[in-house]
Amino acid sequence: MEKRQTGRPRKKEGSIESWQFARAAIVMCAYDEARENGQKHSVAVRHAVDSLRQCSPEMPISETEVKRILSTFRPRSSGTILRFERSTFSEEDIKINRWIREQFAALKKGKGRDIHSSFCRKAKLPPT
């Protein structure tokens, strides 16, 4: 019998959970919008916190966390940064997105069918 390690389970190094990545995307997008509108850094950080709390009140966020996110994804010494921009879905994009969500929900319930070929037919893509 194997002995379990004590303490908090270790995370894979260099990985984050999907909700943390989504939070970082929202924060960086809101921060960039504020900076493009001429706001100073501290005001842009506050704007990012307020934007995230408005769209996802259940997600934990603080000004310190926004600064951590910015330093993680946009280090000063790096020539490359990760940038997100807001975009609006077209009616067709909304229909495809809704259909994909329905397929995943059906798959979770065990009613799913071959998603790839169904998606290709729905999106008018050639099957592979």
Image: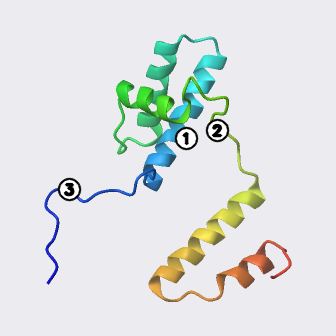
Above or below, 29 against 42 in this view is below
The amino acid pointed to by label 3 is Arg
* Front position in the image: 37 or 75: 75
Image x and y of residue 9, in percent: 24, 59
Please give left or right for residue 68 compared with residue 86 in the image: left
Label 2 – label 3 distance at C-alpha = 33 Å
The amino acid pointed to by label 2 is Phe
* Front position in the image: 69 or 119: 69
Image x and y of residue 81, in percent: 63, 33
Q: Which residue is mark 1?
A: 25
The disc, 2 or 3, on the residue closer to the chain's N-terminal end is: 3
Q: Residue at x 37, y 43 (%)?
A: 59
Q: Residue at x 73, y 58 (%)?
A: 93
Label 3 – label 1 distance at C-alpha = 27 Å
Please give left or right for residue 104 compared with residue 117 in the image: left
Please give left or right for residue 38 compared with residue 123 in the image: left
Answer yes or no: do the residues labelled 2 and 3 have beta carbons within 8 Å? no
The disc, 3 or 1, on the residue closer to the chain's N-terminal end is: 3
Q: Which residue is mark 3?
A: 8
Above or below, 8 against 28 in this view is below
Quadrant of the rendering where the N terminus is positioned: bottom left
Q: Which residue is mark 2?
A: 84
The disc, 2 or 1, on the residue closer to the chain's N-terminal end is: 1
Label 2 – label 1 distance at C-alpha = 6 Å
Answer yes or no: do the residues labelled 3 and 1 have beta carbons within 8 Å? no
Labels 2, 3: front one:
3
Q: Which mark is residue 127?
A: none
Q: Residues within 10 Å of mark 3 (few under 14, many from 20)?
A: few
